[in-house]
Image: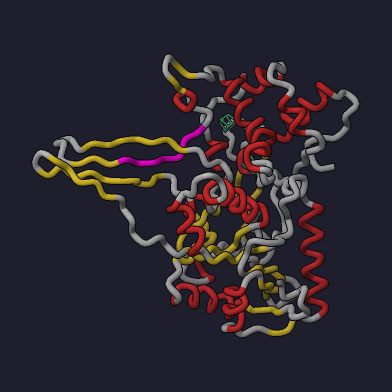
Amino acid sequence: MTAGQSGMARCINLAALQVLIQLLAGDGYAVIGPIRRDDAIVYDRIAGITDLPAGWTDDQGPGHYALVRRGDDALFGYAVGPDAWKRFLHPPVETLWRAQREGDTFTLAAPRAPAPRYAFLGVRACDLRAIAIQDRVFCQGAYTDRSYADRRRNAFIVAVHCGGVGGNCFCASMGCGPRVDAGFDLALTELVDPAPHRFLIEVGSEAGAAMLARLDSEEATSSDLDLAESVFKRAASQMGRHINTRGLKELLQTQPHHPRWDEVAARCMACGNCTMACPTCFCTTIEDHGSIDESSAERVRTWDSCFTLDFSFIHGGSVRQSASSRYRQWLTHKLAHWIDQFGVAGCVGCGRCITWCPVGIDLTEEVAALRMATDPGSTVSHEHP
Ligand code: SF4
Ligand code: SF4
């Protein structure tokens, strides 16, 4: 159910947004939202609306990210930064168990502290889809990752529709945005102009409806609804990039020896930035750490990347020794094998891998080049038509 669909569209003002954050904190949630830090917009604990990046937006291109001033005080007037919500739901470092020596024996203990209760404020449509993909990976296969499932079950999600999009966004091509459609408790559309600064608010769950009932809200006017519609249309028309997904799985799975893999590998540094920034990449490795006095040890799970040599190490060496084989593995897994494995592509079109690649490798350009080489009649550019 959404407020708009049920004819109960409501609006809240800035004061009510502040109350929402305070109510969530009062209910025991760690409220995580966008903040400006280190010249980027990242996600961290917030106490109120003054922590939000008012009046800032992001200028993005291949290998390029810069914060610039907007001409208004929008709180959510940027696209996505280097952070993804997976940092909270699937932490980069997680201790699985600890062992403590006691004389000639030892005890094992799994750290089973209660899972944190996160309230995420400002989740974009692409990132909602990324969370849904990680739900499949961690909770809907043969095995359930208990720590992810616990954190996910506890989460309260306040989504925000994109009002303007980044130069590397292509969520529309992937069918993942820019309009939020599911997977949230509450969803906001920021209406900045004309004043007053306010938010159209939609309900996506029972918990969201209960929270909205605790806020001061007003019935949305027809001009509020028209303005929100223009926000959706503007975002959809501003996609910086485009990917032609027609037959993409077959295209990638039938091109293992294409010379384009070597061309991209000549630029790729195999640094793994793309996998770290990607909101759907989920691979991990396991490390055992022992104390120097041999009194204790712990097993730790950390994010890993298919761009490292160690990632494909089996007895005798690494299976994927060349950068071209590792880039090919990443791209074909994301856009082809992932569909065989999980029923959906592993890409939501957020553009982070393009922005945060130090040499500006652009997967939409790589796909367009592969398509052009196999289908010279193809005229679909990777830049937005
Ligand atoms: S592959 Fe790139 S564009 Fe696609 S979801 Fe990952 S980071 Fe975003
Ligand atoms: S594609 Fe870019 S970000 Fe990814 S491993 Fe290669 S150089 Fe690093």
In the rendering, at what x and y percent does residue 225 appear? 79, 74
Task: Pick out the residue farthest to the front.
Answer: 142
Report the magenta residues as a range. Answer: 299-305
Q: Nearer the viewer, residue 1 or 195?
A: 1
Residue 286, image x, y percentages: 38, 36
Q: Magenta region's main secondary structure?
A: strand
Percent coordinates x, y for residue 140 in the rendering: 57, 50
Position of the N terminus by quadrant: bottom right
Q: Position of residue 363 (x, y in %)?
A: 68, 34
Residue at position x 78%, y 51% from top? 238
Q: Quadrant of the C terminus?
A: top right
- In this rendering, does residue 64 appear at all? no
Q: Residue furthest left?
A: 103
Q: Is residue 44 above or below residue 208?
A: above
Q: Against 307, is 108 above or below?
A: below
Q: Is residue 172 left or right of residue 146?
A: right
Nearer to us in this view, 54 or 189: 189
User: Which residue occupies 44% across, 52% down?
Assistant: 146
Q: Is residue 17 left or right of residue 195?
A: left
Residue 235 vs residue 94, the one in the foreground = 94
**109 with respect to 48 (left or right):** left
